[in-house]
Amino acid sequence: MFGFSLRSRRKPAKQSAETARDRLQILLAHERSTGSGPDCLPELQRDILAAIKRHMKIDNDAVDIRMDRGDELSSLEINIEFPAAEPSR
Amino acid sequence: MTSQMKQEPPVESKVIVITSGKGGVGKTTSAAAISAGLAQRGYRTVVIDFDVGLRNLDMIMGCERRVVFDFINVIQGDARLKQALIKDKRLENLSILPTSQTRDKDALTKEGVEKVLNELREDFDYIICDSPAGIERGAQLAMYFADEAVVVTNPEVSSVRDSDRVLGLLSSKTARAEKADAEPIKAQALLTRYDNQRITSGEMMTVEDVLEILAVPLLGVIPESSAILRASNTGTPVVLDEPSNASVAYEDAVSRLIGEQVEMRMESDRRPGLFQRLFGRTA
């Protein structure tokens, strides 16, 4: 009974502290790394938009960027919407 | 999972600032819990981090890995609002608008904030503004366009004094204060880190003491609780984590915020039961 009470009181606390440490390590590693300055993503978005615009006609807000940072790999998801039929110029 | 009772939406969207003056009293924890609580009840809710340069709401909400664009990018025209809003993975009608970690408060402009809030008003029932500590630009802009305010206060002298100062600003330096025909901001106090044991022993001011000084209605009393740290460790708003006295207290506060009458319950998480008194307090 005593042992059970100790486990149920302590174990979740330890687990959540570990979660906290892991989350911070991943986040801070990303924040400290160079190359992700304040305007990195808006600039990337502008560059992608400009590159695509050289080849096809798309709206200025047709690019959608999503990010998911992980401990082993991060993913950058870029969705570009363009009209089904090429509008006449 | 969570109940999505369809409630009557508010007649028009409400902007609610969570503010305090003093730091570390529980603004972000409360902003996260209140917005998750509102979303749980079916309201379309967005929570905005106004603490430019010291972004933390994303961590408390558990979406820090998904931040691409932020509030400042939207104000400066580098991203659309829809791109910067992060949809919560637990509650579909909850969104988070993170702030910038690299800029400073000067990146916020009154016009920019107003434009973003007006755009959000079209899609959300509740817009929760998580204010930075202090009373400077970030805090002033977080409260400027508010319809209501939740003043987070600890039963402790410096916190109560700062809350009083913030209440003064709410009634003088805000859009509603400046417009002659507007109703003043409805401000309510949320007492956090409330410790029944220390109040019983006379170490800590009581709810009545604090309310008498501040002279505002009471939105709720949140007990000091280990559940708060656990929730922040895992990036879960307290009301979405395992039930605790703190989560129940936040749910009650949310009920009062939407106008329901709920009796005040004052329970401390730390009151030991007989079993704990006998065996469990070896820490």
Image (tube, coloured by chain):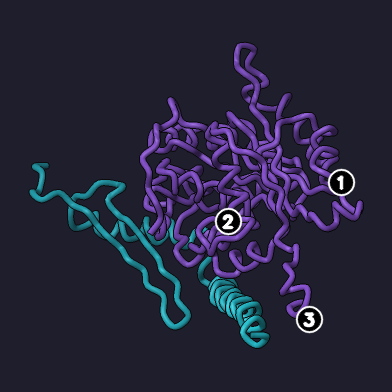
Looking at the image, tell me whether mark 1 or mark 2 is earlier in sequence order: 2
Q: Nearer the viewer, residue B206 or A30?
A: B206
- The answer to the question of whether label 2 and label 3 lie on touching residues, with beta carbons closer than 8 A, is no
Provide the residue designation for mark 3.
B282
Q: Quadrant of residue B206?
A: top right
Q: Is residue B205 above or below residue A19?
A: above
Mark 1 belongs to chain: B
Q: Nearer the viewer, residue B199 or B228?
A: B199
Across and down, in percent, residue B64 comes to: 51, 64
The answer to whether residue B11 is left or right of residue A37 is left
The answer to whether residue B179 is left or right of residue B115 is right
Provide the residue designation for mark 1.
B205
Q: Please, what secondary structure does the residue beneath circle 1 have?
A: loop
Q: Quadrant of residue A44?
A: bottom left
Provide the residue designation for mark 2.
B57
Q: Residue at x 44, y 44 (%)?
A: B41
Callout in the foreground (2, 3): 3
Q: Nearer the viewer, residue A86 or B72?
A: B72
Instruction: Respond whether the residues carrying marks 1 and 2 are from the same subunit.
Output: yes
Mark 2 belongs to chain: B
Across and down, in percent, residue B90 comes to: 41, 59
